[in-house]
Amino acid sequence: MPSRLATSVCGVPLKTPVWAASGTFGYGIEFRDLLDLNEVGGIVVKGLSREPLDGNPPPRLYETNAGMLNSIGLQNIGVRAFIQEKLPELRRYAVPVIANVFGYAVEDYAEVARALEDAEGLAAYELNVSCPNTRHGGMYFSSDPALLAEVVSAVRALARRPLIVKLSPNVARIEPLARAAVEAGADALSLVNTFVGLAIDPRTRSPRLGMGLGGLSGPAIKPIALRMVYEAAQAVKIPIIGLGGIATGLDAAEFLVAGASVVQVGTANFWDPQATVRIARELDAFLQQEKIPCVSHLVGTLKL
């Protein structure tokens, strides 16, 4: 990749600032025959839990206008199987691997982080806090600053690697959550996760997804995601990783201008398995056209 794209985040050197988002790129290995993994800026693997999860009943995906609803249910093989089966394969490639961590109690997050600490080949952790806390009546970690701070602090106490906290957009204001994560020890923030949505079949009068509600992603959410990335970047001083509807190099450039240092590509991977590499090349073409020598010069340059 061209040197214009080289950057770093939380001390992790990156060939490009374009990562594959969690839940859309499997464990990374599944894409090795579809593109050169060495050209991907970073891979955020499927969310990892203490024990394997089967996920939600089908149907799990539904295509919407300019987007997609999903209700996968965080299906995964569990953290120990990931360490034994997937991570050794990923270590063959010169690409930063970020482990996405989730749970339904603080102890869950801590247990996954503890297991990952002994594993080789990881660049950072990304905490998915968009989960209901079963010990607090189902209140979501992502919607309460105190709960968010509790889980971030617990993992921070265990983690030697950089700690990224992935925030949910399903809140009234993003700034209090961003500040709470920073005060609890986050090294970077990634946002946004999916928006809660619903699709209905009017003939059967039933939801299109097996679980009813799902998470909306794709180009439809990009303007709102951009706004929230900008707000978070104004509220805190740590790096922001932006995602939400990025499908082209120009989309990526918009997130960088809004204040993101790195971007993640999610839904686009479903229709274009080479999206991360293609978008990085399109971003480089934009930098060359605009005579911008380094991608970091674009970060946070929005004129309001």
Image (spheres, helix red, strand yellow):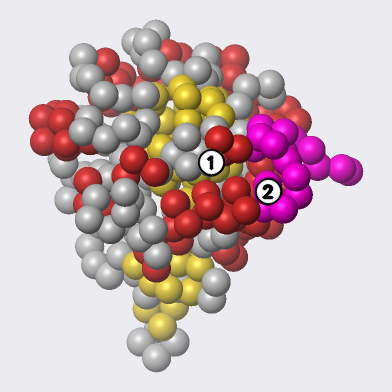
Q: Nearer the viewer, residue 68 or 261?
A: 261
- Position in image of residue 214 (x %, y %): 42, 60
The residue beneath circle 2 is 288
Dot 2, how many residues are within 10 Å of its Cα: few (below 14), some (14-19), or many (20+)?
few
Q: Amino acid at mark 2?
A: Gln
Magenta-tinted stretch: 286-304
Question: Relative to 151, does residue 212 appear above or below in the rendering?
Answer: below
Q: In the image, 266: left or right of 106?
A: right
- Position in image of residue 11 (x %, y %): 50, 18
Q: In the image, 126: left or right of 60?
A: right
Write the residue at 26% across / 24% down: 121
Disc 1 + disc 2, Cβ < 8 Å: yes
Helix, strand or loop for disc 1: loop
Q: What is the CA distance from the residue labelled 1 to the residue labelled 2?
A: 10 Å
Q: Amino acid at mark 1?
A: Pro
> Toward which corner of the image does residue 43 lie, by quadrant?
top left
The residue beneath circle 1 is 2
Write the residue at 27% across / 70% down: 59
Q: In the image, 202: left or right of 95?
A: right
